[in-house]
Image (tube, rainbow, N blue to C red):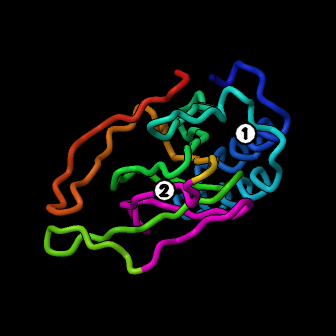
Amino acid sequence: MTATIPLPGRLAAFVRGMDAALGTAPDEPHAVEACAALLRELVAHDDWLPGDCSRPHPVHYQQYLLHRDPAGRYSVVSFVWGPGQRTPIHDHCTWGVIGMLRGAEYSRAYARENGRLVPAAIEERIEPGQTTCVSPSIGDIHLVRNAYDDRVSISIHVYGTDIGKQSRYVYDAETGAAKSFVSGYANA
């Protein structure tokens, strides 16, 4: 989708809010704070996500583009997690705010220590209506998984760039070795 395609009402209001918040070129902490407030309002309602952007894949999670800012300041994506699905350990190389729309997910942060990746002791669980943030300045490496083995979960992600075109990294859990990738979108 692009900005020229009509957006569902709640998503359109979110995009207007993001455009206003980012229009003053805020620094990253202010952009993340504004985005988190707007995203909490968006994911407080589960009546707006188009059906074609909420379909799971039987093998791996799906990343659907909902909106790409024409100026390249941010993108909005739905992540659809089939039962038991997970990401590899990865980063984003930009700020991001994640809001839970349906179901729940776990995120385990990783930190670099002596060239190795060390997992956080506790996974963060995100429930509907809640948000969490990532960025290179506050922590950007994690593994995310559907909290459920028997149903779909959906989260809405907002990133400070077109995440489907962003070069970023997946990491080997044992060695910490990084491999570059570009995620793309299931619908674009």
What residue lies at 67% left-to-right and 64% top-to-bottom? 127
For the point 35% across and 51% down, the residue is 88
Residue 120, located in which quarter of the rendered image?
bottom left
Q: Amino acid at mark 2?
A: Arg
Please name the amino acid that badge 1 sits on. Answer: Val
Q: Is residue 183 above or below residue 41?
A: above
Asked if disc 2 and disc 1 are in contact, CB closer than 8 Å, the reply is no
Task: For the N terminus, give its image quadrant.
Answer: top right
Could you tell me residue 118's position as x and y percent? Answer: 27, 73
Q: Which residue, given by chain and number where applicable, does mark 2 sit on?
A: 145
Label 1 belongs to which residue? 15
Q: Residue at x 52, y 36 (%)?
A: 62
142 in magenta: yes
Magenta span: 122-149
Question: Going 43% across and 67% down the picture, which residue do you hit?
Answer: 108
State the image quarter where residue 164 is shown.
top left
Q: Earlier in the sequence, mark 2 or mark 1?
A: 1
Whether residue 163 is visible to the viewer of this picture, yes or no, is: yes
Question: Can residue 93 be seen in the rendering of this structure?
Answer: no
